[in-house]
Amino acid sequence: MIYYVHMKKRALISVSDKTGIVEFATGLINLGYEIISTGGTAKTLSDNGIKNLSVSDITKFPECLDGRVKTLNPFVHAGILAIRDNSNHMKQLADLNVNTIDIVCVNLYPFRQTIEKEGTTFFDAVENIDIGGPCMLRSAAKNFQDVIVACDPKDYQTILDNLKSGIVDLTFRKMLMQKTYQHTAFYDTLIANYLAKELELKSPDFLTLAFEKKQDLRYGENPHQNATYYETAIPNLKLSLSKAEQLNGKELSFNNINDAQGAIDALSEFACEDECVCVAVKHATPCGVALGKDSFEAYQKAHDADPISIFGGIIAFNKSVNKRCAEEMVKTFLEVIIAPNYDKDALDILKTKPNLRVLKLPEVEKEKQFLQDFKILHGSMLVQDRDTSDELMSAKKPLEKDKGTFIEELRKKARDLSNGGVSVLEDKTKIKTTPTDRLQLEFGVKVVKHLKSNAIAIVKDSTTIGINGGQTNRVAAAKNALEQAGKKAKGAYLASDGFFPFADIVALAKKYEIKAIIQPGGSIKDEDSIKACDEAGIAMVMTGVRHFKH
């Protein structure tokens, strides 16, 4: 025998996000449902003329502890979790005088919005951790065959349509169930990640990540691969492409996004620069980086660094784009342009290219917050700190905590030559580097950090003139980069992401009349390279910091 407590259908509604809730509740009442509600939701419904019972009416127990306890009650959870076809369950409800709850519509305390607010304290954040909401959602999802669970306002109308048809099929119920557990997992992950960030935990025993879908993409790296773009739920990542505003052009592709983020990452290395910086990227690798007095000069230098590779590339600036620069850029096929701003006449020119993706990203800063890199493998993942170390540092003398300020002060000293450009780099050769040399060597290392290992960058006048990376040996990378630089290599600077195990690269540098070399050092044969530099009349600086990027 099946016991039925009552014939009145009931829906429990308790939402922080009130989007569409009045229309949803109205639709449920028209379908014969009685509404149970709480706090602010009850007020919203009542203010809109929608009759509802309070949770206290159901539980016979008042809300307490400033609302911390209101739905954590058997009269709520038994009504949700009872299996309707289980006669024992239904008899117990009858004996306990507990009513069934057939629809649970809940979304959670705004934890994410709270931690995004300026000035939010740790205890403010903790107070916005929902307890009762996730419990009700999980209970309803577990009993999916008897209870409809709604955590997303986008599903309200579909639920109403299904109810009107008289059939809410099992597949739809399972979809709502899956979405609910994904929703609560996302919520808990957001809280856990916030706490990990607060505590600066880098290697927890269990790692969960919270990302939210930004858009479905037409395809992945190749047309036969499906792809989706997600952005982190942790707020205030100023360097994320997901924060950019698209001003022109067609939808970003998978490769556009990947390459553009690489351009932004490289650009952030030059956040302290007073000059305009232009970074050109092709296939996720910088192909031209240059400093100039304005966007036109910086772009022209970056373009001329490799006019072939820049075709179909991504361009990023740290300063506003002017008209002259825009006129020059539209002469070349480019996929994406990123800048903090655009002069009006410059934007008008760029918009004459309907497919050109023009993005506005606020002033790029050196990201100072807790950041990690994730490399997804088959069935596993590698996690590491991001390589955010500033150059002009050695293993023996690390920079002060505020590295950006330190670098800025060091650059000022180097420019005015007032104290000989004192830095923390180590001159290893008899020929010593000048402050001007060190600025160029620093520029080279900032570029080489963003090339695939083995990586070599040849720079001159704050411009790349030869770049090569991703080779299986460093000699080939040096040879290709120097050949690209050609005659311009005379008096230029060579930067390497890793040490020299032999003196062969120095021999190549001598052939092209390189002025100075910067590399991390650390090889057991460092002295061979130092000796070769002394014999070749080349200065060599070692940083003690390797910059592999695989």
Image (cartoon, rainbow, N blue to C red):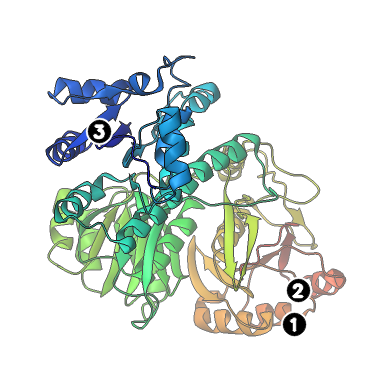
For the question of whether residue 82 can be seen, the reply is yes
Q: Is residue 270 left or right of residue 536?
A: left
Closer to us: 488 or 102: 102
In the image, residue 231 above or below residue 95: below
In 3D space, how far apart are the residues under numbered discs 2 and 3 (Cα atoms)? 62 Å
Amino acid type at circle 1 is Asp
Secondary element at tag 3? loop
Residue that sits furthest to the front in the current view: 1
Residue 536's place in the image compared with 441, above or below, is below
Q: Which mark is residue 18?
A: 3
Q: Which amino acid does label 2 sit on?
A: Phe
In this rendering, position of residue 550 left or right of residue 67: right
Q: Name the residue under label 2.
A: 500
**Counting residues from the N terminus, which is met first, the one under dot 1 or under dot 3?**
3
Q: Tell me if label 1 and label 3 are in contact, CB under 8 Å.
A: no
The spot of residue 40 in percent (x, y) is: 29, 22
Q: Nearer the viewer, mark 2 or mark 3?
A: 3
- Residue identified by numbered label 1: 504
Q: What residue type is labelled 3?
A: Lys
| Quadrant containing the C terminus in the rendered view | bottom right
Residues packed near mark 2 inside 10 Å, few (<14), some (14 to 19) or many (20 plus): many
